[in-house]
Amino acid sequence: MSSYWHNTILGKYSPEDRWVGLDFRNLFLDPLSTKLTHIHELTHSVLSRSTDFGQATEVIYQLLPRMKHLKPEDKDLIRQSLRNAQIFTQEGSACLMELLRLKSEIGRQP
């Protein structure tokens, strides 16, 4: 799931391949943003692996390339439908974890 809340996508989680990627070119000199982006993307990973919907989605993503009876446009429609069904839950939870970590990093400012 790519982040729509930033002008630059600083990280990505791939449910098909189960990897978290960070854009180190843009994060290189900003350790706090790197940490927050990593937490954001890890939240996507945790939700994909620990919720019923996430686990079902990961299985479907992994099986779609082997489903020869479906047309490529139908496979794309399935991926898009699964993604759209969870975008707000995924992004909302990932942003919440990112903000909670930021709060713990900077504490309460007077």
Image: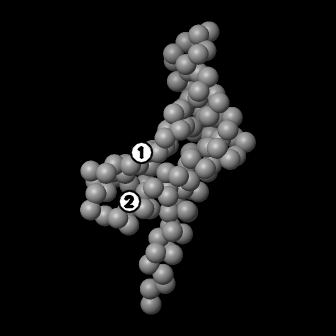
From where the camera sits, is residue 56 visible? yes
Q: Earlier in the sequence, mark 1 or mark 2?
A: 1
* Relative to 53, 16 lies left or right: left
- Compare residues 65 and 82 and report the one nearer the observer: 65
Residue 82 x/y as whole percent: 61, 34
- Compare residues 36 and 8 and report the one nearer the observer: 36
Which amino acid lies under the numbered mark 2 shown in the image of this protein?
Thr
**Residue sitting at 59 percent across and 10 percent down?**
68
* Relative to 26, 94 lies left or right: right
Seen as rendered, the residue at the extreme top is 69
User: Looking at the image, is 22 positioned above or below residue 105?
Assistant: above
Q: Judge the density around disc 1: few (<14), some (14-19), many (≥20) Cα neighbours within 10 Å.
A: some
Read off the residue under disc 2.
34
Q: Quadrant of the C terminus?
A: bottom left
**Residue sitting at 45 percent across and 55 percent down?**
38
Residue 52 x/y as whole percent: 73, 42
Element type at mark 2: helix
Read off the residue under disc 1.
21
